[in-house]
Image (cartoon, rainbow, N blue to C red):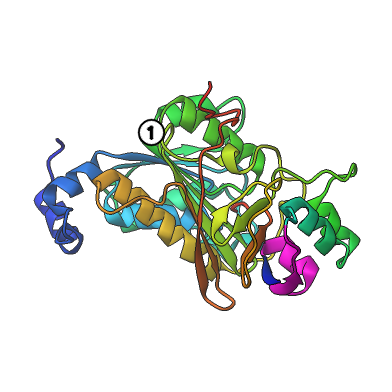
């Protein structure tokens, strides 16, 4: 087990006193690696919370440069970084918070060419991508490589989250067996909505790494912040799922 | 008997409301219910639920009293049951 420095013990003192965490839990966080893709409205806050919690290594995948329309929700992007690569802005902000963090930057989004290799570098994935093509690739690789995946999504003032433990719980393709045609790349949303579900996603990752609590498996937690309605939808693995189907 | 149908995301936007009451018949399947409901809404609402051949889109999520359910199912309806129709959403 990786040892904590005296500085780290001081930084993480408050969370190490959470029942079930302790020094051993913090060592698990330090030894963990997480892919966050992308680091937009959702992924920025996921990465920030994981960096704050002392996760040892983050792999950040996000192509393109910072645009003005990113700045209402992508909290790792800054006005002075407009026109420059998003992952570099993200890395800079994260290291300001936690200089002990190891960060690997992927200057592109997850795609068919890089999905398997990127997923192979980490212990788990937080899916914060806006396109179902990317989400299905991460789901496929999570199942193939038996790595947990936390799936976060948002729209307008609504959001949802589920955690996938391959072979044990419903995967993304169990929910969506085909590409949803109605989903559009650009959609209405506030940063406070993405930040809300992103904090929940980071908490799921922290729970999985440290072993505390119960992960949100076989459950879709939905929320509508317009009237603060939170609901849990019970799910089951789909026997005929082309990615994790039991008959495979 | 009266049940409640709730909408999320793009379906909610197209319906212009978060929920509506619906008079369901004994033995009515989820697919029949959705076809009947779709008739009350816009063409765009219908195309979110059904493809050009009139087939229900498998990427739609449906919950019956908080549990995911297959569209082919005919629940044993009770007064105040809830159906939730959920449009797929992603991140960003």
Can residue B15 be found in the magenta stretch? yes
Q: Residue furthest front?
A: B26
Give the percent coordinates (x, y) of residue A248: 53, 21
Q: Nearer the viewer, residue B2 or B36?
A: B2
Q: Nearer the viewer, residue A195 or B34?
A: B34
> Which residue is pictured at 66% across the width and 64% down the height?
B8
| Mark 1 burial class by Cα count in 10 Å: few <14, some 14-19, many 20+ | some
Horizontal side of residue A102 vs A28, given as left or right: right
Give the percent coordinates (x, y) of residue B1: 71, 71
Give the percent coordinates (x, y) of residue A212: 24, 51
> Which residue is pictured at 24% across the width and 38% down the height?
A31
Residue A93, can we see it?
no
Residue A158, can we see it?
yes
In the rendered image, which quarter is residue B22 located in?
bottom right
Can residue A243 be found in the magenta stretch? no
Q: Nearer the viewer, residue B88 or A99?
A: B88
Q: Quadrant of the N terminus of chain A?
A: top left
Horizontal side of residue A154 vs A220, given as left or right: right
Q: Is residue B39 above or below residue A110?
A: below
Horizontal side of residue A136 vs A166, given as left or right: right
**Magenta residues, as a range?**
B7-26
Quick one: SS at disc 1? loop
Q: Is residue A227 above or below residue A34?
A: below
- Chain that bears disc 1: A
Give the percent coordinates (x, y) of residue A29: 25, 45
> Which residue is pictured at 13% across the width and 53% down the height?
A22
Q: Which residue is mark 1?
A: A122
Q: Residue furthest top?
A: A248
In the rendered image, which quarter is residue A12 located in?
bottom left
């Amino acid at each position: 087990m990786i040892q904590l420095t005296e500085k780290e013990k001081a930084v993480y003192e408050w969370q190490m006193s959470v029942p079930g965490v302790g020094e051993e839990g913090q060592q698990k966080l330090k030894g963990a690696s997480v892919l966050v893709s992308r680091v937009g409205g959702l992924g920025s806050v996921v990465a920030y919370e994981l960096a704050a919690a002392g996760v040892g290594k983050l792999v950040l995948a996000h192509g393109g440069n910072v645009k003005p329309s990113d700045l209402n929700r992508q909290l790792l992007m800054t006005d002075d970084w407009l026109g420059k690569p998003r992952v570099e802005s993200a890395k800079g902000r994260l290291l300001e918070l936690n200089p002990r963090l190891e960060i690997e930057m992927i200057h592109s989004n997850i795609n068919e060419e890089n999905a398997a290799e990127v997923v192979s570098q980490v212990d788990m994935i937080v899916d914060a991508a806006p396109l179902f093509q990317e989400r299905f690739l991460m789901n496929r690789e999570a199942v193939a490589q038996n790595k947990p995946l936390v799936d976060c999504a948002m729209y307008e003032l609504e959001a949802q989250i589920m955690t996938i433990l391959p072979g044990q719980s419903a995967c993304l393709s169990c929910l969506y067996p085909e590409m949803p045609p109605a989903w559009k790349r650009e959609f209405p949303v506030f940063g406070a909505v993405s930040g809300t579900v992103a904090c929940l996603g980071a908490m799921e990752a922290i729970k999985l790494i440290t072993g505390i609590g119960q992960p949100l498996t076989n459950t879709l937690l939905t929320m509508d912040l317009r009237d603060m309605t939170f609901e849990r939808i019970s799910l089951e693995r789909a026997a005929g799922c082309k990615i994790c189907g039991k008959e495979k | 008997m009266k049940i409640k149908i709730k909408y999320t995301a793009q379906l909610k936007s197209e319906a212009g409301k978060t929920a509506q009451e619906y008079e369901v018949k004994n033995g009515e399947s989820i697919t029949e219910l959705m076809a009947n409901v779709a008739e009350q809404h816009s063409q765009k609402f219908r195309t979110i639920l059904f493809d050009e051949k009139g087939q229900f889109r498998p990427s739609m999520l449906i919950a019956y009293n908080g549990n995911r359910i297959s569209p082919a199912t005919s629940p044993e309806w009770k007064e105040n049951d809830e159906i939730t129709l959920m449009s797929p959403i992603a991140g960003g």
